[in-house]
Amino acid sequence: MLTEICTLSRIINLVKEKGEITQQILAKEFNISQQSVSRKLKELEDANLIIRIETKDGEIIRLTEKGENLLLNCLNEISSAIAFQHEIRIKGKVTSGLGEGKLFLSLPYYENSFKKFLGFTPYPGTLNIVIYDRISFENRLLLDTSRYINIPEYRDENRVLGAVKAYPARINDLEPAAIVIPLRTTHPKSVIEIISPYYLREKLSLKDGDEVLIEALI
């Protein structure tokens, strides 16, 4: 089935490019004999996946409804698989912080930077999550080697505001949100901070000890 899907997509792309194709063109494209091309086209036609229209210059090949559905279903499966590979799932429990997130997000530099790089102005405060299971902790470690949005360090005459790694995310299916990891954080790796334009405790009806699922969209 996978071979048929790849063959179908390549044939249709060739038809789109050239308008009409010959078995000679297909043989060269697939690096097989014209006899093999003829046999493959007949198999696809017999399976009601394509329609072949003979012309003086070659053939015009169209997908049947069955062939179109086959490619669309395959595309959905592939898209879903790729999306899954680009998500890191972390379960944890809500815990109270020390109020550092509120101070951190009240600074104009960070507020403006998150709006610029993440597309939203964060609520002034972070939601702290403590990780308690092995798989989620391993996924948290994966973040350290994954792509992230860099909020650069900022220096002025009086202070240095450290850089922050941000990972767009969803929490309990709610978006937008982001995992933020200050480069100079005092938190252990078992604790992560989430920002969002929403007051997450209220929006998701959360209290200390509630379990949440964070999906980092890397």
Image: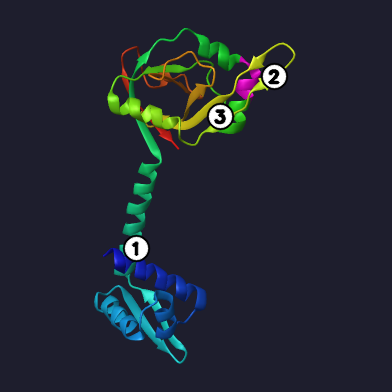
User: Percent from the top left, x then y, of residue 69?
Assistant: 32, 63
Q: Which residue is mark 1?
A: 71
Q: Earlier in the sequence, mark 1 or mark 3?
A: 1
Could you tell me the amino acid type at mark 3?
Phe
User: Percent from the top left, x then y, of residue 23?
Assistant: 40, 84
Q: Which mark is residue 155?
A: 2
Q: Which residue is mark 3?
A: 120
Q: Residues within 10 Å of mark 1 (few under 14, many from 20)?
A: some
Residue at the image position 28 percent from the left and 22 percent from the top: 133
User: Percent from the top left, x then y, of residue 74?
Assistant: 32, 58
Calculate the distance from the C-alpha at mark 1 to the C-alpha at mark 3: 37 Å
Instruction: Mark 3 vs mark 2: give the one in front.
Output: 2
Q: The residue tagged with tag 3: helix, strand or loop?
A: loop
Could you tell me the amino acid type at mark 1?
Leu
Instruction: Mark 1 vs mark 2: give the one in front.
Output: 2
Q: Name the image quarter holding the C terminus.
A: top left
Q: Name the image quarter holding the N terminus.
A: bottom left
Could you tell me the amino acid type at mark 2?
Arg
- Start-end of magenta stretch: 107-112
Give the colouring mode of the picture: rainbow
Calculate the distance from the C-alpha at mark 1 to the C-alpha at mark 2: 53 Å
